[in-house]
Image (cartoon, rainbow, N blue to C red):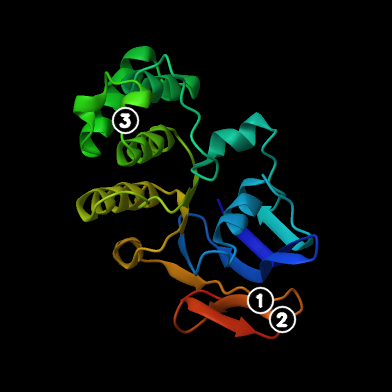
Amino acid sequence: MRVELRSAGVELDGTTLLAPVSTSVPAGGTLVLRGANGSGKSTLLRLVSGLRLPTSGEVTVDGAAPAPRRRAFRRLVTGTVEPPLLARDLTLGEHVALVATTWGAPVRDARAAAGALLERLGIADLAHRFPHELSSGQTQLASLATVLVRPASLLLLDEPEQRLDADRTAVVAELLAERREAGATVLVATHSTPLEDALGGDVLRLAARSADTPDQGLDPERGVDDLTPDGGAAHA
């Protein structure tokens, strides 16, 4: 899925949550969002997911405004933009298998996919635990499992490396790279340089700025952010 932002920004009660951004990500591409806390990384992901509307500019996914109330859109888009909703009475393995069946996998295939994914993430031995029995890092991996088990053409991930060690972060990078190679578009907000390096793709470094500053966009030579007076952006 192709993602485009044209001078897209967000203000709330006079506070700039995201200074205007102009950039595009081709179908099957990767965009890594970097920047300090408060620079707007999460807000940008919420714009693309349709969970927040821009107060200026425009956001499109495959040429149309994001529409999270439409099942067809939800089927194509997944991520960790919102906190995970984990039912207290379902085990980790049941959660992941349920997500797979919800999006069309036969029960047997869903259980197999859930088991294989939990194995890749190194938490197969936790499949029979309930959410309240997981540590913070294990909960993060559980959240990622419910995202990655789904069929989707656009993945939006907000700091997937949170509370993970270097080895687990590397596994997450491998899984995301595999999804991209299969044709998915991947947008990731991160503070992790190793994750950024492993994913490749373009990098957009956001800075907290007022809404009347020039658009934030990508340097066409480096695939890294630059402030461009006309808001244009290109990819290396």
Disc nearest the viewer among 1 and 3? 3
Residue in the image at 28% along x and 52% along y: 169
Residue 16: x and y in percent read 71, 67
Kindly identify the amino acid type of the residue bearing the numbered disc 2.
Answer: Thr
Numbered circle sitting on residue 213: 2
Total numbered labels: 3
Q: Could you say which is closer to the camera, residue 236 or residue 42?
A: 42
Q: Could you say which is closer to the camera, residue 138 or residue 58?
A: 138
Q: Secondary structure at mark 3?
A: loop
Kindly identify the amino acid type of the residue bearing the numbered disc 3.
Answer: Leu
Label 2 or label 3, whichever comes before in sequence order: 3
> Do the residues bearing badges 1 and 2 touch, measured as CB atoms within 8 Å?
yes
Can residue 175 be seen from the camera position used here?
yes
- Determine which residue is flagged by label 3: 134
The answer to whether 198 appears left or right of 185 in the picture is left
- Determine which residue is flagged by label 1: 209
